[in-house]
Amino acid sequence: MFVIEHLEPKLFKWCLFEYSHISSFVGRKNLLFTNIKSSVLKKFGRVEQKSVKQFRFDKACILDPEAKQTLTPDIAKKFNYFIFGGILGDDPPKERTKTELTKFLPYPAFNLGRAQMSTDTAVIVTKMIVDGKKLSDIKFQQGVCIPIAKGEEVHLPYKYLLVKGKPLLAPGIAGMLKKQKTF
Ligand SMILES: C[S@@+](CC[C@H](N)C(=O)[O-])C[C@H]1O[C@@H](n2cnc3c(N)ncnc32)[C@H](O)[C@@H]1O
């Protein structure tokens, strides 16, 4: 089960694109959103208004870029619940996963390398590790440039999965950035 503790002040469009992307990879039955009241999200997974801090899960761990130990397929086998921060990227990283999640939960935390990934990328990479792939065998690209108008582009300074040589971005994000007028 993949648990996303929503930690943004609202359900931004950007979050919605990432959450929809996660659901398409792991399946709605394997996805739980906590700390959010939203009927929109119900089509992507189970939704609980309660925070993940109010649940007690058997065999749970947290995915946190600041954790000391890296998740491996052997470690992943020991867990049933994988908890993520529903947090949008920030540069430089504010370590919100550590201060808003890990600090309050009685579960071990693991990293997927130290570079920051989007929540959807982190879930997909965790699913690949759960399915037996080693982090070192997964191909990534650091940073993505999205052309938004002639001579203009937006740089997203995060680590993206490479699929058939192309960085995997949640569907909808590039289009949203192209339409966005101010940054
Ligand atoms: C965009 S990241 C949030 C990073 C944020 N800047 C912070 O300070 O924690 C969203 C979520 O994806 C997961 N994540 C992203 N990169 C990760 C990494 N390298 N290792 C483990 N988890 C990661 C974490 O669960 C994190 O809360």
Image (tube, rainbow, N blue to C red):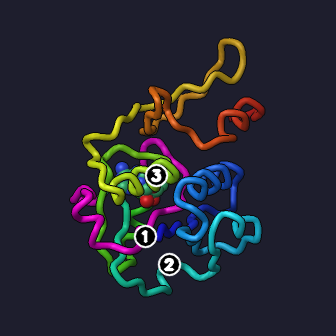
The disc, 1 or 2, on the residue closer to the chain's N-terminal end is 2
Q: Quadrant of residue 140?
A: top left
Residue 77 lies in the magenta stretch: yes
Which residue occupies 48% across, 62% down? 85
Q: Is residue 79 left or right of residue 46?
A: left
Residue drawn at x 62%, y 79% is 48
* Residue 97 position in % (x across, y down): 42, 62
User: Hey, which residue is sitting farthest top in the picture?
Assistant: 151
**Span colored in magenta:** 67-93
Mark sitting on residue 101: 1
Spatial separation of the CA atoms under disc 3 and disc 2 = 20 Å
- Give the answer, above or below, for where 14 lies relative to 29: above
From the viewer's perspective, is residue 103 above or below residue 56? above
Secondary structure at badge 3 equals: helix
Place residue 143 in its image quadrant.
top left
Crowd band around label 1 with a 10 angstrom C-alpha radius: few (<14), some (14–19), many (20+): many
- Identify whether 137 is placed above or below 149: below
Circles 1 and 2: CB distance less than 8 Å?
A: yes
For badge 2, the amino acid type reads Val
- The numbered mark at residue 52 is 2
In the drawing, what numbered circle is on residue 124? 3
Instruction: State the SS at label 1.
Output: loop
Q: Quadrant of the C terminus?
A: top right
- Disc on the earlier residue, 3 or 2: 2
Let me know if residue 55 appears in the view: yes
**Amino acid type, mark 1:** Leu
Q: Is residue 94 visible?
A: no
Crowd band around label 2 with a 10 angstrom C-alpha radius: few (<14), some (14–19), many (20+): many
165 vs 58, left or right, is right
Mark 1 CB lies closer than 8 A to ligand 1: yes
Residue 110 location in percent, x, y?
29, 61
